[in-house]
Amino acid sequence: MGVFGFLPRLRRGRHERAGFALYTTAAAAARDPFLFATIGVPDTLDGRYDALALCAFLMIDRVRLEPPPGPALAQAVFDAMFSDMDLALREMGAGDPTVPRKMRAMWEALHGRAIAYRAALVGGDQAALQAALARNVWRGMAVPEGGPAALARFATAQAAHLAGQPAAAFIAGTADFLPAQAAAR
C-alpha cells in the first residue's frame, strides 16, 4: 500500500457507516411484529431471515439505482447484512469451519430471492410476487390464507415508499420504512 493507500479506505468507510445505518433500518422493519402475528410469516429462524432478506433486498434494490455512490452504498448495505449474519451465526454457536458454508447459502438465498422479487416488482406482477413470497417465506409449511397477498402488498408499498425518498437521505444513512400494518393494506 502506497502513501495514499488509505484514501480508498476512508471513502469506503463513509459508505460502510451509511450502509450499516440503512441495514439497521431494514432490519428493524423486518422485526415488525405485524409480519409474524398477522401476516403469518413464520416466527422461526428461517422466517425471520426471510423477513430480513425481503426488507434488505428492498433497501439494496432502491439504493443501487442511484448514480454513484449508489452502487457502492448498496454494496455497503449488503456487506453490513452479511457481517451481521456472520456474527449471529457465531453467537448461535456455529463453528468456524461451518460459517463460510452457511454464509454462502444465505447469500445465494438472498440472490435468488432478489431476482424473483425484482422481476415481479418491476413488472408490476402481484401474482408472481405472491408466488415467490409463498415459495420462499413458507417453504414446506402451510401457507396462511391471505399471507402471500398481504406480504406482496407490504413489499410493493415499501418499494414505492423507498422510491419516494431522496438519494441524499440514503447517502446520509437515513431512510424509513412504513409500519407493516399500513404497508400491508
Image: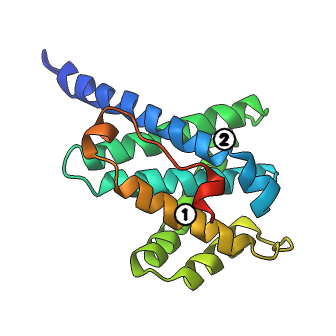
Residue 118, compared with residue 88, is above or below; it is: below
Where is residue 139, by image quadrant?
Answer: bottom right
Q: Secondary structure at mark 1?
A: helix
The one of 25 and 1 positioned closer to us in this rendering? 25
Residue density around tag 2, few if under 14, some if 14–19, many if 20 or more, within 10 Å: some
Residue density around tag 1, few if under 14, some if 14–19, many if 20 or more, within 10 Å: many
The answer to whether 27 appears left or right of 40 in the picture is left
- Residue 17 lies, in percent from the top left, at 39, 27
The single residue placed furthest to the left in the displayed view is 3
One can see residue 42 in this view: no
The single residue placed furthest to the top in the displayed view is 3
**Discs 2, 1 touching: Cβ within 8 Å:** no
- Total residue callouts: 2
Residue occupying the point 32% across, 54% down: 64
Name the amino acid, label 2: Val
User: Which of pointers 2 and 1 lies earlier in the amino acid sequence?
Assistant: 2
Residue 36, compared with residue 93, is above or below; it is: below
Residue occupying the point 52% across, 74% down: 116
The residue identified by callout 2 is: 99
The answer to whether 66 appears left or right of 32 in the picture is left
The residue identified by callout 1 is: 155
- Residue 136 lies, in percent from the top left, at 68, 69
Cα separation between marks 2 and 1: 30 Å
Name the amino acid, label 1: Ala
Q: Secondary structure at mark 2?
A: helix
The one of 33 and 137 positioned closer to us in this rendering? 33
Residue occupying the point 32% across, 26% down: 13
One can see residue 140 in this view: yes
Q: Quadrant of the C terminus?
A: bottom right
Where is residue 106, by image quadrant?
Answer: bottom right
- Residue 164 lies, in percent from the top left, at 34, 55
The answer to whether 11 appears left or right of 27 in the picture is left
